[in-house]
Image (cartoon, rainbow, N blue to C red):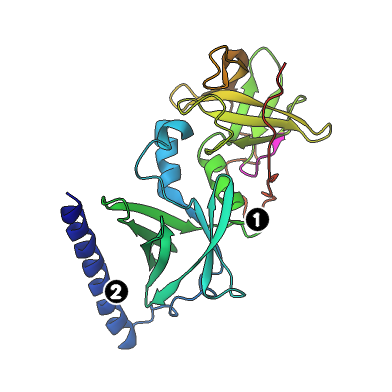
Amino acid sequence: MQKFSFLIFTTCLFFVFSCKNDAEKTTNAGNSTGHAPLSAEFLEGNWVAKSFINRIKTRSSVAQSLKSQAVPFSLAFSFSKKKPDSVLCYQSERMWSLPVKYNHDTLEIPGGKDGKPVFLVYSDKPEKSFIMFDNTSGQLVQNYFIAAADKTSNGLGAFFTVLNFETVSDYYTLKGSSEKVAFSPNGIITGWKEYDYFQICIGGRCQILGPDIDCIYLMNRKTSKGKWFGFQLDQTDKTLTIFDVKENPAKTPEYILGNVKYEFEKAPAPDKKVKENPAGADTKLPQKTPAPEKK
């Protein structure tokens, strides 16, 4: 099976490289649609795993999407001309640097996953993007990365901006209240007296409710007090339900879902739309968010 996967992998790469070489010949012949050779300067900025975010959106669940074998080893990449021979990689609780090699429209990360190489093939049509080919597990996995409009944060911050935009970012009415609440792509909440900042758990220690339930951190920045909750996003019914958490007597997982704490229903957008993905939004996130307080 592994030999078969490897054969598919090498065939895909051969096909991609052949197409790229033909495109390069066309460009050299005078086609004005060509671009400069790949380099850290050309790729400067953040790139986020859009195909993974699309899966989260389709399933309305981060936790369920994290179970897939198609989860990329890095949720985002950051390139800088100051460090031309390396790329910054990001996971939920980790940032690290890896060396890179450029070859025309292809970027190789020799130690990409478990010390094995992964390949990213660049295209600027219809938008600036990469397709990442990962055969390190013996099964070919492809992920689609896009250039992030957000230039103010690191790669993980840019990932959160796109994730928020595609999931919980919207206008809501808080059930049992007259409050009109907006969740913005940059993690800011407006119109809610209790909290004004949120962060979705994307794996790691914040998965306090186990691998099946989504978690969200809500914070009041004025008081610097925050708390983890469970949440459920229903794209069909257009609702966002947030649950209290409580200690689990069985100890594993450490916490379990409690009662419904807040219920939001999507509301019509005013003139100024939250759903406009704001380039240059303040998406700097706290380095760590505390675990729930034990009673």
Residues at marks 2 and 1, CA–CA distance in whole angstroms? 32 Å
Q: Nearer the viewer, residue 215 or 274?
A: 215
Quarter of the figure that contains the C terminus: top right
Q: Taking 42 as reference, is 4 left or right?
A: left
Name the element at disc 2: helix
Q: Is 265 placed above or below 154 here?
A: above
Measured as percent of width and height from the top left, residue 69 is found at: 34, 42
- Whether the magenta-drawn stretch holds residue 159 is answered as no
Estimate how packed mark 2 is, as few (under 14), some (14 to 19) or many (20 or more) residues with alpha carbons within 10 Å: some
Type of secondary structure dominating the magenta stretch = loop
Residue at point 43%, 24% (across, down): 236
What label does residue 279 carry, if any? none
Q: Which residue is mark 1?
A: 153
Q: Residue at x 57, y 15 (%)?
A: 248
Q: Earlier in the sequence, mark 2 or mark 1?
A: 2
Q: Nearer the viewer, residue 232 or 203?
A: 203
Q: Position of residue 176 (x, y in %)?
A: 67, 12
Q: Is 12 drawn above or below residue 293 in the view shown?
A: below
The x and y percentages for residue 100 are 46, 70
Q: Residue at x 37, y 52 (%)?
A: 143
- The image quadrant that residue 117 belongs to is bottom left
Residue 20 shows which numbered tag? 2
Q: Is residue 38 left or right of residue 285?
A: left
**Which residues make up the magenta segment?**
185-189
* Left or right placement of residue 166 versus residue 293 in this view: left
Residue lying farthest right?
Answer: 223
Image quadrant where residue 293 sits: top right
In this view of the protein, can residue 30 be seen by the observer?
no
